[in-house]
Each structure stands twice: as structure tokens, then as C-alpha cells.
Image (cartoon, rainbow, N blue to C red):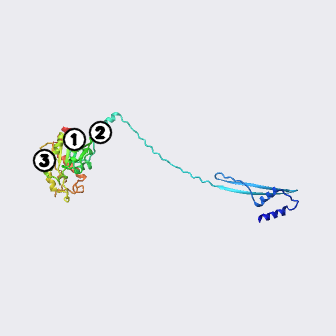
Amino acid sequence: MGSEIMKDKLKAFFGDPRFSVPLCAVVAVIAVFTGVVIHKSGVTGRSVTASNEAVTTTVTTGTTSTTTTTTTTTTTTTTTTTTTTTTTTTTTTTVTTTTTEPEEAQEEQAEDTETRPAYVYVPAGESPNADFYQNRIVVFGDSIAYGFNAYGYVPYEHNLAKESVSMWNMGAFTFDKGGGEMSMTDAAAYISPSLIYMSLGMNDVPGLTPEDFAGRYRGVIEELQEKIPGVSIVVAGITPVSASCTYTSCDTIRGFNSALEQMVADMGSDHVWYFDAYSVCADPYDLTLRGDASGGDGIHLNSGTYGEIFGALFNFLDMTPVMDNMLAVE
């Protein structure tokens, strides 16, 4: 329908023979009426591009000229978003500096090391010879004896004590003090001390008689004397238990200690001594383990009690020829 109206308008416009127009002019006029414009536009990056194009149509007939100009403007906007990611890497450099001392300084340091005790132990006792004894003593025994090492009174190298050791099962326990796993007596010989503190018996009380216990104990002492000639041995009495302990009784323990003391007396050796560790820990009123000496279970001891035992021991040794014996074998 629209095309028919257009044709009528053209006839009305060009119908007069005086206005004879070429076909191309007609096409141009159609383009003007329909508003058809061909244009190009370009966008680069973040920019705005405007494109203006003009279409000019000229119609000439005789002496009359009609010019029609149509301008179309197209605006295109393009936005570009850029995301930048930054990664930070931290590098840590460790620099180790080695300083070489002169040979004389190294020799002086070595000499100083040899003269100092190998272990900084918890000091015990008021004896003027306490350091001498404590720096040399080796502890041999059960879990109660192990407390001397556990609480810092003797070094690991001088500890030959473990949980559950007794006279009847001693052969099942081994120690490695640098020469491989060895029996307790062989490990003692490997260390080759001048003084041994033996503390055993709590694990023997339920299963042995006092006489049997003392007889086995003597056999271990004689084995140590054979393997370590000149060694001084202290046989410590079994420590008491609390009044509420059901494991054993203090009466039973005192019976075992009496057997030990008699055994040492029977040996008649000036290198074997019985030490009454029981009395150090006992309450003077009922002879049970003092409350302030207990480790909490009524059988084992606390740290301070080990210091008390060593203090009493060193005072006791000062009254014996033990120091002379020790110096004789060193």
C-alpha cells in the first residue's frame, strides 16, 4: 500500500513532460524519502568514534536544480575493563657463618672441658666431698632408683635403673651405654665406675623371702666385684611405703632390710657398705613413708627426697674409707 502512495506522489511530481528525470535520480530520491544511509564506524580500545556521512542527491531538469542533503550521525561507545593481578613472593635467605678458632684456643677449650663435670646435676648434701661422690656415682636398681636420673641427680650415662627390675628378673633387662645392649652387670663394667649405689627390692618383696632376696643380692654384688675390680658398692635399704599402701607393709620391708644388712656384714668387705635409706624417708612417729617424701602413690619418691638421700649418703661415706678406695682405682 505504501509503495502505491509513493508511485502516485512521483507521478504528481514528475508527471509534467517538462520534468523528465533519469532513473538514477529517482533511486536517489527514494533513498532520501526512506532515510537509507550507508555508513561505517570504528572503535578502538576505550574510545568514542563519531562518523558523519552526507548523502547528496542532485536532480537536474532543464534550468531548475534541486539539491537534497541528508546527514546521519552515529555514535558508538566501547568500554574495556582490564584486571591486573599482582603476585608477591617472599624469599628467606639463611646465612651461616663459621668461625675457626686458633689451635691454641681449641686446645684450651678441650682442657677446660676435661676438667669440668660432664653433667650439671642437682647438688645434694652438705658434705665437702659431695661433688666428688656425685660426679662419679652410678645408680643400679629399679624404678625407685631411676628417680635419681629422672630428677637430675645423676646423668643418663650413670643410670642403670629401670622400672620393674628385681633380683628374680634382672637378667631380662639390658642397657646400651655406648657399646651396644648389655646386661646390667656388663653395662656397669662398660662404664667402669669407682662407686655404685644399689637400690632394689620393692619388686622382690611380694615374691621372695628376705633370706632368698639377700642371697641373690650377694650374688650380683660378687659379679660386679669380679667385673670391676676395686669398685666400692653401697647397698641401700628398701625405702618405706605410706601407711595406706596396700602393695606391701613397712614391717615386711624392714624384715628385708635386716636381711640385707646382715648379708653385707657377713661379706666383711671394706668395699661393700650398707646404707639405711629407709630411715631417711620414714616418718619418725610411725616409721611409714613421710607424706612430704612421697611421689604421690605411696611407694615412689618425689624429687626433694632424692636430694635428702644423697645428702645423707655422702655424709655417711665421709665416715668410711670409700673415698680412699675410689681414688686408688682412678
The answer to which of 326 and 224 lies nearer the viewer is 224
> Can you identify the residue that label 3 sits on?
263
Label 1, residues with CA under 10 Å away: few <14, some 14-19, many ≥20: some
- Labelled pair 3, 1 in contact (Cβ < 8 Å): no
Place of residue 77 in the rendered image (x, y in percent of width and height, measured from the top left):
66, 56
Name the residue located 33 percent from the left edge and 36 percent from the top edge.
106
Q: CA distance from mark 2 to mark 3?
A: 41 Å
Mark 2 falls on what kind of element?
helix
Q: CA distance from mark 2 to mark 1?
A: 24 Å
Label 3, residues with CA under 10 Å away: few <14, some 14-19, many ≥20: some
Q: Quadrant of residue 118?
A: top left
Place of residue 318 in the rendered image (x, y in percent of width and height, measured from the top left):
17, 44
Sequence-wise, which precedes: disc 2 or disc 1?
A: 2
Sequence-wise, which precedes: disc 3 or disc 1?
A: 1
Which circle marks residue 189 in the picture? 1
> Can you identify the residue that label 2 sits on?
113
Specify whether 140 is left or right of 12: left
Sequence-wise, which precedes: disc 2 or disc 3?
A: 2
Mark 1 falls on what kind of element?
helix
Amino acid marked by disc 2: Thr
Residue reaching furthest to the top: 103
Place of residue 3 in the rendered image (x, y in percent of width and height, measured from the top left):
78, 63
